[in-house]
Image (cartoon, helix red, strand yellow):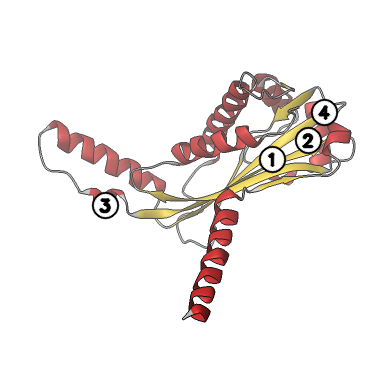
């Protein structure tokens, strides 16, 4: 009986430790060289997020035009920029300046770069173009099962049905999975293009959500974990 009790206590202890470590773990990486390099940093440029679709899904990869991708990328860039600015006035403020995204995008445009072709440019070239001490590059990978436009049509149809007083599709349809979105942000140093910091996460998308909603959740965690603090 005592032996079984000891085993039970041991298992409970192991389980508790595993749960604690898992719940407290964060998807963050910080280079051991960060403090040495960041002492000379004054400005960080936030690059428009690179948006990529899983080409293995038939009919999904090419559903968005270059214009749509660029528009979405600029919206996400603005969301991340504003969230990081909010953190500069938080209890533990970010001790760095962020290059105005209008300046960032103008410098990219002068070099013929958009969200659609940024992935073809090296980190070193981007650092030279943006004239910042470090750059933050975010990538959004979508593995869609259902076209995002189908979600918009669903929302429009539901709203119209509610206006005329007809019953709408239940919660089961709204929670239906559309796919997954993987997001990661990486901070690179100007001098040698070294990766100084990184954060990442993965989310499921349902019919009643959008990439913008998911990205808003992501930027909250990203900004709180952003370095350049005492």
Q: Are marks 1 and 2 in contact (CB under 8 Å)?
A: yes
Q: Which residue is mark 4?
A: 133
Q: Earlier in the sequence, mark 2 or mark 4?
A: 2
Q: CA distance from mark 1 to mark 4?
A: 19 Å
Which structural element holds mark 2? helix
Q: Are marks 4 and 3 in contact (CB under 8 Å)?
A: no
The image quadrant where one finds the C terminus is: top right
Label drawn at residue 173: 3
Q: Earlier in the sequence, mark 3 or mark 2?
A: 2
Q: Which residue is mark 1?
A: 118
Residue 112: x and y, percent?
Answer: 71, 32
Residue closest to the far front: 2
Q: CA distance from mark 1 to mark 3?
A: 36 Å
The structure residue drawn at horizontal position 63% and vertical position 37%, both measured from the top left corner, is 115
Q: Earlier in the sequence, mark 1 or mark 3?
A: 1
Q: CA distance from mark 3 to mark 2?
A: 43 Å
Report the mark closest to the observer, 2 or 4: 4
Report the mark closest to the observer, 3 or 2: 3
Res. 78 image quadrant: top right
């Amino acid at each position: 009986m005592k032996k079984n009790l000891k085993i039970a206590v041991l298992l409970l202890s192991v389980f508790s430790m595993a749960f604690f470590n898992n719940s407290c773990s964060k998807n963050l990486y910080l280079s051991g060289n960060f403090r040495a390099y960041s002492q000379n940093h004054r400005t960080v440029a936030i690059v428009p997020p690179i948006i990529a679709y899983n080409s293995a899904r038939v009919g999904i990869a090419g559903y968005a035009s270059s214009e749509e991708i660029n528009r979405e990328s600029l919206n996400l860039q603005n969301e991340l920029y504003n969230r990081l600015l909010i953190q500069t006035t938080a209890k533990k403020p970010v001790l760095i300046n962020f290059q105005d995204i209008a300046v960032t995008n103008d410098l990219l445009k002068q070099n013929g770069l958009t969200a659609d072709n940024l992935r073809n440019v090296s980190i070193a070239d981007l650092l030279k173009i943006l004239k910042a001490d470090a750059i933050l590059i975010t990538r959004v990978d979508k593995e869609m099962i259902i076209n995002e436009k189908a979600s918009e049509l669903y929302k429009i149809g539901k709203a119209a049905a509610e206006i005329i007083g007809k019953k709408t599709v239940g919660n089961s349809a709204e929670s239906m999975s559309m796919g997954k979105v993987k997001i990661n942000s990486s901070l690179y140093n100007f001098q040698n293009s070294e990766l100084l910091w990184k954060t990442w996460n993965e989310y499921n998308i349902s019919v009643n959500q959008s990439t913008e909603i998911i990205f808003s959740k992501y930027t909250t965690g990203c900004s709180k974990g952003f370095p350049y603090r005492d």
